[in-house]
Image (cartoon, rainbow, N blue to C red):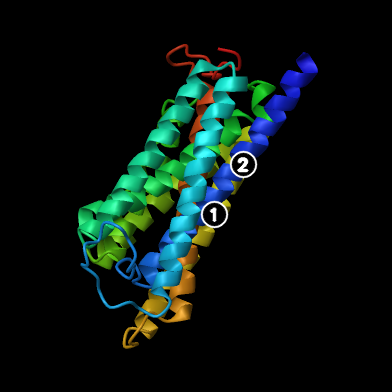
Amino acid sequence: MISNSRANGVWLHRYAVLLAFCTLLLVVAGGLVTSNEAGLSVPDWPLSYGKLMPPMEGGIFYEHGHRMVATTVGILTIGLVIFLFRSEPRRWLRRLGLIALGAVILQGVLGGMTVIFMLPKPVSISHACLAQLFFSTTVAIALFTSPAWKRGPRPVDDPSESPLRWLAIAAPVCVLGQVALGAAARHKALGIVPHVAGALLATGVILWVTLRILMRYSEQPALRASALTLLGVTFAQVFLGIAAYMSRLATADAVQPMPVMVLFTVLHVAAGALTLAASVVLAIQVFRNVRWPAAGIEPAGFAVTS
């Protein structure tokens, strides 16, 4: 019985990793649609009522691909919820699965509204932000179902008067704000200046929290790995952002979006999703493994069996 339960846990974790990977592909597919200005080039969309723009080259291909990946992610999310309720004893994790399913449904509604109402900026921006939040949720579920998580926390003390957990919360909040500003810039709701300013703020907070962890808690494996991962994807994100901006300037006079601009923009969007997910994982690990002695609080632990 124990062996069977352990096998179910292994397969649940693998399934969660698969869902997270497919969700990242969905973010990439969405970036391709936006970067190629293909969002309105869907002549067979059942709710468009004929309100179509002339198709951009390859637009139908990108939109169909995005729709197929979205359908796959939706089906996999339903499967995850079923898997969780059949084999996962932690009630809070089953609820998180339901939240993920609700996010997928809402994401589909927002996606349909972008076509029905001809890409309204608030809806399109919300659609982009929710996709990134959903990806972070799938990564968190993959973390919670991993063997390393089930082995339990390895607590360390936080002697600082400015608790690490507040910095850990600030990092994903700043990254999410930056994601929203980036989506607003791509959909021409805002200029590039707020996005650049947000990048400076988010990068500064990430450097602060990761370097503090690496200097004080380098012997704690989960914290060290999470900090190094977040630091690595953040640097990649910054360089991809510069490349995306420079390629957009270089191809500004092109009739259609150029491949080099599309490539760097889509990679920048994907790296943004990875940065948000990595910051969420780091925050989770801080709450799980770092004591807050000023308030006498033990690490959260996220009980494995309840």
* Residue 305 seen: yes
* Residue 158 seen: no
User: Residue 276: x percent and y percent?
Assistant: 45, 46
Callout 2: few (<14), some (14-19), or many (20+) C-alpha neighbours within 10 Å?
A: many
Secondary element under disc 2, as helix, strand or loop, is helix
Q: Residue at x 47, y 37 (%)?
A: 137
User: Residue 122: x percent and y percent?
Assistant: 21, 53
Q: Residue at x 47, y 43 (%)?
A: 74
User: Residue 287: x percent and y percent?
Assistant: 50, 25
- Left or right of residue 191: residue 203: right
Residue corresponding to mark 1: 233
Residue corresponding to mark 2: 17
- Left or right of residue 234: residue 110: left
Q: Quadrant of residue 261?
A: bottom left
The amino acid at mark 2 is Val
| 258 shown above or below 96 | below
| 150 shown above or below 79 | above
Q: Do tag 1 and tag 2 residues touch (Cβ < 8 Å)? A: no
**Where the N terminus falls, by quadrant?**
top right
- Alpha-carbon distance for marks 1 and 2? 18 Å
Q: Residue at x 37, y 78 (%)?
A: 248
The amino acid at mark 1 is Val
User: Residue 41: x percent and y percent?
Assistant: 33, 71
Q: Which is more toward the observer, 111 or 185?
A: 111
**Disc on the earlier residue, 1 or 2:** 2
Q: Nearer the viewer, mark 1 or mark 2?
A: 2
Label number found at residue 70: none
Q: Residue at x 29, y 56 (%)?
A: 181
Q: Across the whole image, how many numbered discs are drawn on residues? A: 2
Q: Which is more toward the observer, 122 or 282?
A: 122
Secondary element under disc 1, as helix, strand or loop, is helix
